[in-house]
Image (spheres, rainbow, N blue to C red):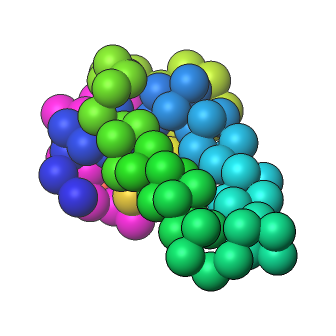
Amino acid sequence: MKDSAWRRRANPWSVWTSFAAIPAMIVAIWSRVWLGWVGALLPVAVVVLWLVVNPVIFLAVDVPKVWVSKGSYGSSSGSLSATVCPRATGPSCDG
């Protein structure tokens, strides 16, 4: 992903609402029991669409201050540039 995508993904609201998608996906898949496989495709598609749109709708985080933002920056595996991580203090900020 590009730096701008990682910065948007680091927004705490984006992180927490992505975690909230996990039980929603479980329920969507489980809904095949009472909706059938074809009927369960709509809830699964809604959750997948949310996961795709989620990082786009939240504002970017320029300097990670909370731990979920720092974790998102850390999961970038060093792909963030030095301008995103002004204090190069770890493997996620090697630039």
Percent position of residue 12, x then y: 57, 26
Residue 35 falls in image quadrant? bottom right
Q: Is residue 81 left or right of residue 85?
A: left
Q: Is residue 79 magenta?
A: yes
Q: Is residue 14 left or right of residue 32?
A: left
The N terminus appears in which quarter of the rendering?
Answer: bottom left
Q: Nearer the viewer, residue 44 or 69?
A: 44
Q: Nearer the viewer, residue 81 or 11?
A: 11
Q: Nearer the viewer, residue 61 or 88?
A: 61
Percent position of residue 48, x then y: 46, 58
Residue positioned 41% across, 38% down in the render: 54
Relative to residue 61, is residue 2 depicted above or below? below
Residue positioned 82% across, 68% down in the render: 34
Percent position of residue 50, x then y: 45, 44
Q: Is residue 38 left or right of residue 77?
A: right
Taking the image as drawn, is residue 2 in sight?
Answer: yes
Residue positioned 62% across, 80% down in the render: 37
Most extreme residue toward the bottom, as rendered?
A: 37
Percent position of residue 2, x then y: 17, 52
Q: Is residue 51 magenta?
A: no
Span highlighted in magenta in the image = 77-90
Q: Nearer the viewer, residue 36 or 53?
A: 36
Number of marks in picture? 0
Residue 59 falls in image quadrant? top left
Taking the image as drawn, is residue 26 in sight?
Answer: no
Q: Is residue 74 left or right of residue 40?
A: left
Per the picture, the main secondary structure of the magenta-coloured stretch is: loop
Relative to residue 72, is residue 12 depicted above or below? above
